[in-house]
Amino acid sequence: MIIRLCLLVRPLVLLFAVPFSAAFPDEPAAPPDDAIAHVKAAYIYNFTKFVTWPDSAFDDDRAPLVVAVVESREGACTHAIAEEIGGKTTPRGRPIVVRAAESLVAAAGAHLVFVADPPSIEPADLRKAVEGRAVLLVGDTPGFAETVGGIGLVVTGNRIGCEINARQAESASLRLNARLAGVARLVRGSAPN
Amino acid sequence: MGTSLTDLSLEELHDISVTTAAKHEQPLFVTPAATTVILAEDIRRSGMGSVGDTLRLVPGLNVAEQNAASWAVSSRGFNGGSSSKMLVLVDGRTVLSPYDGSVYWGDADIHMSDLQRIEVVRGSGGTLWGVNAVNGIISVVSRDAAETQGSLISVRGDSIDGLDVYARAGMKTGREAAARVYGRLTDARTELGAEAGGGTLEVTRKRAGFRFDLNRSTAAHTTVQGEFLRQRRTLEGQDPSATGGSASAAVSDHAYLLGRQTRTFSADNQLTVQLYGDLRRGQSVDNSSLSGSGRAGTLDKGYEVDLDLTHAIRVSTSNDLVLGAGVRHSVIDLDSGNTVSGLASRSHRDTGNVFVQDEIALLRKGLLLTLGSKYEFHDHSGGDVLPNARLAWTPSRRQTLWAAVSRAARHPNTSETGAVSSQLPVPSSTGASSGPVSVAGNSAMRSETLNSAELGWRGKPAAQWTLDLVAFLNRYSGLRNLTAASMASGNTAGGGTQSGGAYSIDNSLRAQGEGFEASIDWRPGEDWRFSAYYAYARLHATDGAIESALSSLDLAVPRHTGGIRGWWQACDTLEVAASAYGVSNLAAVAVPGYIRLDLQLIWHPRLDCECALGVQNANDGQHTEYIAGQGFLTAPIRRNVFARITWRF
């Protein structure tokens, strides 16, 4: 058997040697950040469909749903999110407004706060900033849903998945659609209350 | 691309790869092939309990349930029980028996909770997928271990089938590594009808497995997975003359280990290496008709080692090259209980392949030409060249027109070429029971080949609508043909009664098939989804005399198949699903047509808990989907009420 396999493998090795040696660069590729940002933006748009905010979170029936993006980089995520979902509406007909926020204070009044990687904000400060308000926190730092709450977006290989801390979201008076559970890992909060 | 990212459903978004989103991989909408992707959510909503049943969702596939553990699945004809012209893969691993080409459905049955997707390509795909990808490819893909973190328990009970209990634990094993371990018990019981000799067939499967994934950013992805499966099939209370044996039990073990690494050197340069080993041990007791496919003849011991390399590289802005190679070594042992000659037999197979395919963006906008070929070497039947040429034109984001010509081949399997005779069920066109017969292997058997032409159109007239049309013309040559050598009754050396006489096998048949498939998907809102399909197919011999009904069965194809599905999410916690499937009769082998209606209610009392209640075949007390008796352990499909609860913690 071994001899037979060797005979079969030998021409394959020769076939691959040439293209491999010519094709492989020395350094591995960086992740396609732009594509990742756009997929994350599409996720955020879906969250506006499958999370229900209480009526009291809005001034009136026509008030917009405000998405605030807090990020350390120069507006890369804000730009992608604004491009993908700015001007769209929620299933209840509310226009979605996307705005950049330099700080948590500047994000006040938003219904969904996306904390993009990696602002130097402590989890405790994030939780405190939205305490008692109907705000969905979304972040893309590792362990976000567990340490902060809300929804964490996680890059796994070539795909982007999400983690949901349902307890934290429900304590913020948000109602989550069961479809979210179908695509997410459910986590419990590890943060002290 | 036909849609923007925000047009994708939550489930599609979860399934999309970042490279696809960056338009570096070919999205489905512009693929020049009849391709369908079924996501885990589709399966959950369908209420189907197994991968075999789930394939009913695919337009143009003919899925015939033989019993609770076996299906005959085909595309565009050739549903001769072994699905031998369909290539079935699970996470890149072939699950076809090297003995008779039948599908190990037990291997393919990944639990719904761990399924990422099922990709189905109708039509030939020999250039990329190799031999056996003649009439279609079914690729079952499980989820990355990182996506199955936490614990899960799922229990399903069926009023006529039995029980399915699944438990899984997912864990982080490092900053970039994750693993899951699982165990599953399925017990499926089928009351066989009088045509199949009566009695009860019970199939119990116990399995334990794991999957480990190491994701180093997007630069390298390593997967190691394995499973051990023990299957016990018992057949009690059956009339022995129906299957040619005195029924009892069969136990078989299967284990596999697979490793795969994908290295992404740049967005345009990716290498995948995959190695797996498969080990099988079947222990037949008394009755040889208890094989994996419900057919006579079984593999008693065997192993398979397979190595594959695939390299995808963008050589210029208009050229995407995929090239690869693979080798496979298979050994099978048959013991005296499974061969008419009474001699133990060992045979081995070596195959190897090399392929190259280039995707060329032509000068005119939206025009994509794909040219490629594979050379596959088989130590028994020699080499086959499997070329294809595909042209896709996407004039706008709303439509793609494509055409393809291709050649595919199926290597003869051991039961066809072996020096010893095998017992095969050979049905009678009159429906009269004949029992399994002796079929002498023919060492001169060569590959069956297909030359195929396809024309397709995919349209998206509005964001909520997707339409898909495919027409095909298939010309087969060198098809296997069974010819009666003698019709005298006799006794097999294994002790069974050989009541149908002896047959010889050769490549004397030619045939032509033609037809079309149409499907439509409509999503009027986030909470609604409807889809429907219709397929028309014809297959007829053009040369060679058909002397056995097994050859007739090979060529039997339901002229009409159709399906319609609807799903509605009534509120955040309640879903309702309904579906109907219709298949016309198989006149050549006297199997009547049928319509089947399924209903399901899904309730989520909490985000981490799902309860489902459903009824399958609601409109019909019972019907038969495949030829019964004459060596086939086919059972009538009865109305089935099921309940399922899944809890994640």
Image (cartoon, rainbow, N blue to C red):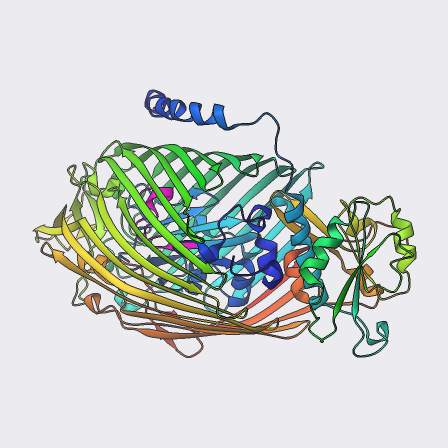
Residue B13: where, in percent of width, then height? 60, 57
Residue B169 seen in render: no
Figure label count = 0
User: Within the image, what quadrant is residue B93 found in?
Assistant: top left
> Which of B102/B60 is in front?
B60
Quick check: B542 left or right of A119?
left
Residue B336: where, in percent of width, then height? 25, 38
As drawn, which residue projects farthest toward the front? B363
User: Which quadrant does the C terminus of chain B fall into?
Assistant: bottom right
Residue B218 seen in render: yes
Residue B345: where, in percent of width, then height? 25, 34
Q: Residue visible at 55% across and 52% down? A: B116
Q: Residue visible at 32% across and 69% down? A: B624
Placement of B133 over or under B333, stated as above or below: below
Residue B497 belongs to the span the image colors magenta: no
User: Within the image, what quadrant is residue B174 found in?
Assistant: top right
> Which of B144/B551 is in front?
B144
Q: Residue visible at 40% across and 39% down? A: B280
> Which of B136/B320 is in front?
B320
Quick check: B242 left or right of A182?
left
Placement of B24 over or under B32, stated as above or below: above
Placement of B211 over or under B609, stated as above or below: above
Residue range highlighted in magenta: B120-136
Residue B411: where, in percent of width, then height? 26, 41
